[in-house]
Image (spheres, rainbow, N blue to C red):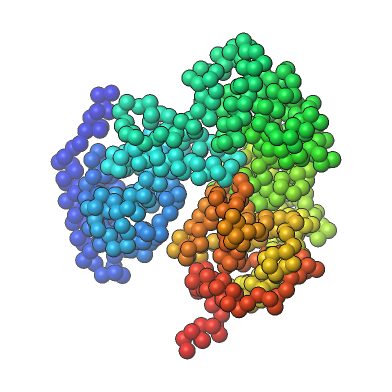
Amino acid sequence: MGSQEVDNSIDTDKLDSLCEKLDDAIRVLAEAREFAKPGKMRRVFDTCRRLLQQPGGCARVEARAQNLEEAGMFLGSDWAHPQILIPSLSTFSLKSADPDTVVVEAISELRLLAIALGDYIHPNMSAEQAHHYLTQVLAINLELLFSTPSEAEREQQGKLALVTRALFRHLAERIGYEHVIDQLIEEIWRILRQRPIQVDSVKQMITQIAICQNNPEIDLGSSGQGADRLISSLYGTTQACREDPGVAVYVERLESMDTGALQYEATGFARAMHDTGLVSPYHAVLLRFLLEHGDHLLSEAMGLSATGRDCLLCYGELVRALIEEAIHPETAQGIYGLALLLERGLLYQPPAAPALWRQLALPLSSYSEQRLALTFGPSPSPRAWLMQGVLCVLGQPLGVGQGNNPTCQSARAMSMWAYNDPDYLLQMVAWAARDDEIIIHFEGQPVSSRDSAPGLATEMPLDLDPVSLLVVPHLDRIYAEMGRRCEGREGDPHRWINPEFHGWWSGRGFRINVDVDSGKLHDLDNFLRHFYASYHPYYNGNQPLIHPQPAGIAVTDSAARFVGWHAITLLRVALDPKDVMRVYFFNPNNDSGQNWGDGVEVSTAGKGERFGEASLPFEQFASRVYIFHYDPLERGELALISDDELQQVKDYVYRSWGADRLPDERLQAQEY
C-alpha cells in the first residue's frame, strides 16, 4: 500500500519540467507552416504521453488544451471537428495499441472538458454540447472508470491502460459522477429498447451502477433514481431474492413456498423480463424448479400470452427438454428467447419441433466445443451455451449482431433465416456444430466452407452469440467464395450472390445507383423510381412487403460523409403513429440508433418500431440505399412519382455520400 501511495503522489518538480518541455513543443508546432506541422508533432505526442502518465498530468494537459488545438494538434483529422465526433467510437481509440491514437483521444477529451467548464470558448462547440458529449463518453466507457486494466489491455497497451483510467477519473471528478450515472441509465434503456441478444455489456454497466450506489466515497446526489428497476431486474427481482441471497439460499426458499407464493414469484420475474429484456440468474433457478409443478406456473414464469401458452401445452415435453438442457443461472438469458420463440408460434411449423429435438441430441465436434468453452467458459457446458443461443436467435431474430467484425452479410443472413425460415437456420447450426462445414449451392454448384479461402473477417470473431460464433465463420467464407465466382461479370456481384446466399425469396430484380467501375452515381432517377414503385405503398398498389429483402446502404457519419457500404434487411414499409411513411429495417451492426448527418437520424423506438427494428422516413431511407432487390413481375407505377418528390431524395444524396460521386455531366452543369 505504501508504494502505491508513492506512485500516486504528485511530483510537482517533474510535472513542472514536463510542462516546460510541452509548452516549448507547442510553441514550435504553432510557429511551423502547415506543411511542416506533421514533422513537429512527434515531440508534442511524446511529451503529452509522458505528462499524462504522471499523477496530476491530466489537469496540466487540460490547462493547455486550447493552445494544443490552436497550434494544429488535430489538423487533418476528425478530431479537428469536435461537433461531429461520435461518443461510441472513443472506446476503440482509448483501447488502441497505438500510443498516438490513445494520446490524441485523451487530449481531445480534455479539450472538451475545458470547453464544457467554460475555460475554452470554442467556435464550433458550445459548453452544453461538450458536457453532453463527455457524459456519453463516460457512460459508454464506465468500466475504464471503475475497473483495473484486463490482461489483454495490459498486454496490448502497457502503461497506456493506466493513462485511460487516470483520464476518466479526472473527467468524472470535474464533470461530476451524478451526471455520468443518469446518462448511463439513459444509454442502457436506449440499448435495451432494441432487444439485443448479447447483453453482457449492459449487465456490466448495471453492475457498475450498483457498485457506485454502494460506494460511500461517491456522492451521486439526486442522480441514479431510475437505476433500481435495472438493478432489481438482475439481482433482486422478487421479494424472495430482494437482497441477492445467492442461488443456494433461493432454492431453499422456493422449497418452502406454496403454489400461491410460487405464482407470485413467477409473475414478478416474467414482468421484469418483458419490461427490460434482461433475465435474472434467479429466474433460471425458478424455471428449473417449476419443471415439476405443471404447465400453468411455467407459463406464468415466462409471461406467455394465449399463443405462447397453447404452444407450451402442445409441445410441453420438448419445452421441458429445452429448459433442462439450456436454462441455467449462467445461461438465464435463454428464458427470454424461449418465451419469444413460443410467442411466435414457431413450433407449429412442421419442421421446427423435429429440428429442435435433433439439436438437443446433436453431437458437437471437438472444435465446436473448444470454441464455445473458450468464449463462454466451461460451465454449464458447450452444448447448453449453444442451445441457449439457438433459443435466443429463434426468439429474437432482430437481435442478432455482427460484433466488431466486417461480417454484416452473414449476420443479416442468420437473422433473415431465423425470422423467415427457422428450420433452415437450424440445419445450418447442425452442419456447423457437428460437421465443421456448411455447403450452400451457387448456381447449381456446391460451395463448401471447408474448401473456401478466408472471407472478410481476417481474425476469428469471438464477440458473438453462441450460434453466430459457430455459423458466421462458415458463412463468411461461402459469401466470399461466391464473390470470387462472380469475378469478370459486368456489374455488382450482389445481383447474383444475394438470392443464392439468402434464399429464394430474395427478388431476382436488381437495381444499383453506382457505376461499379468508376464509383460515380449512375441513373439515379430511374433507380429511385423503381425503389418507390417496388416498396412505397402509394405507388405499388398498397402491396405490403411479404418476405424480408436484402438491400445495401451507403452509411454516412454525423457530418453526412461517406463511411462505407453496409448490408441491411428491408422488413416493412408503413405509416408511423404520426402518419409519416417509414421504412422499417434490420441493421446487424449491434446498435441501430445512428446519426447519418443532414438531419437523417435513425430511430429505434417511439416511431412504430417493433423490438429490433430501425426506421427512417421513406425519402431519407431512399437517399441512403444504393442497391435493392425486387420482384420484376410485381412492378408498381413508375410514372406516378413526381419530380419534386424525387428531387427531395436526390438532394439528400448530393449533400451526403453522393457529393463526390456526381457524374461528369452534372459536374459540368454545376460549373456552368
**Horizontal and vertical percent position of residue 228:** 46, 30
**Which residue ends up furthest to the top in the rendered image?**
256
What residue do we see at 62% from left, 10% from top?
256
Residue located 76% across and 30% down the image = 312
Q: Is residue 282 visible?
A: yes
Q: Is residue 510 left or right of residue 669?
A: right
* Residue 55 horizontal side relative to residue 408, left or right: left
Q: Give whichever of 378, 87 is nearer the camera.
A: 87
Q: Quadrant of residue 288?
A: top right
Image vertical order of residue 420 relative to residue 517, above or below? above
Residue 596: horizontal and vertical position, in percent?
50, 60
How many marks can you see? Answer: 0
In the foreground, 140 or 579: 579
In this orientation, which residue lies closer to the viewer: 494 or 570? 570
Residue 492 can be seen, yes or no:
no
Q: Could you say where residue 97 lies in the image, as x and y percent from the top left? A: 42, 47
Q: Residue at x 79, y 29 (%)?
A: 313
Percent coordinates x, y for residue 328 in the rendering: 63, 25
- Left or right: residue 160 versus residue 542 is left
- Quadrant for the N terminus, please: top left
| Residue 380 higher or lower than 18, as above or below | above
Residue at 54% x, 41% y is 192
Residue extending farthest to the front is 578
Left of 366 or right of it: where is 566? left
